[in-house]
Amino acid sequence: MISIKQAKIDFCQRLKDFVKSLNSYVSTQDRQWTIKGFIDIYRNIYTISADTKVLSKILEIHLFPKILEFAQNNDYAIVLPEHQNYYPDLSFVSIQDERIKFAVDLKTTYRLPDYPGFCNGFTLGSHGEYFINRNSTKNIQFPYKDYVAHFCLGIIYSRTDPASMDEVSSYQITQLRSITSVIHDLQFFVTEKWRLASDRSGSGNTANIGSIYRISDILSGNGMFSRLDEPWFDDYWMNYGKITMTTKTGSTKPITSLIDFIAYRGGDPNLIVPKSRKRRARKQRNNG
């Protein structure tokens, strides 16, 4: 029987090898997305909105047959979430040993043309109930502790400038190849989610973990916790905003930054990703 540690190593490597094949599946020779729109029974093609939620869902649908094929070829069953807002997008369960489960979330984001080398970022799941209570089944397919590892299968793409696209939104099928794709230059990556994490919440008032924004760091898994380890990531996000510290003025404030958390726990601040990188990433996001 394969060890759980070895199963993780094997699954991660096979998933990384798998995503290398996806560009040719989703892209034309000139690097445009092969999806041009949707078609009705009268053979009319309607172009796709550039809305990120719409694109993300269509990309999921487009990739699912290949992901299913990957699972079958590697002796895994895919369990889909029972509800729309459940984590993760895909649960891979070993056919040979049901103890071996991997969470795979599909993440998409777009490059920021005004900030070369940066993207818009994405969220990495909740740091709420199921993240804190690892036995919980609230909003998660299996308890968090049941997963050997948590991966992001991500796509970074460029949005086509609307000015370069035809204003016509409906085409005949004979015009298919003349339609400009709404996105292009798709780039795939696979990384454990803790390696992509920042120390900031990912979206408004919801309890979501935010990602880093520098593309080279995303591709290499060089997030703010990457020089620490996963237990630091877990500890920080389980306690995000719950622990207080005393400021120089004598008042107290909740700890919501990794540098303050490291100091509180007595860790080595030199293991945090350089602060200048974090500031620049945050600046581009706020202005994006």
Image (tube, rainbow, N blue to C red):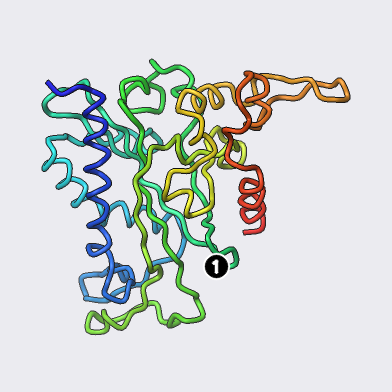
Residue occupying image coordinates x 25% and y 44% = 15
Residue occupying image coordinates x 26% and y 36% = 80
Residue occupying the far right of the picture? 249
Residue occupying image coordinates x 26% and y 70% = 39
Name the side, left or right, on which 136 lies relative to 204: left
> Can you tell which quarter of the image residue 134 is in?
top left
- Rendered-image quadrant of the N terminus: top left
Q: Is residue 181 above or below residue 19?
A: below
Name the side, left or right, on which 9 lies relative to 194: left
| Element marked by disc 1 | loop
Name the side, left or right, on which 28 lies relative to 198: left
> Where residue 221 sits: x, y (%)?
43, 43
> Where residue 149 sits: x, y (%)?
33, 30
Q: Amino acid at mark 1?
A: Pro
Q: Is residue 256 above or below residue 145?
A: below
Q: Which residue is mark 1?
A: 113
Q: Is residue 20 above or below residue 200?
A: below
Name the side, left or right, on which 162 lies relative to 16: right
- Rendered-image quadrant of the C terminus: bottom right
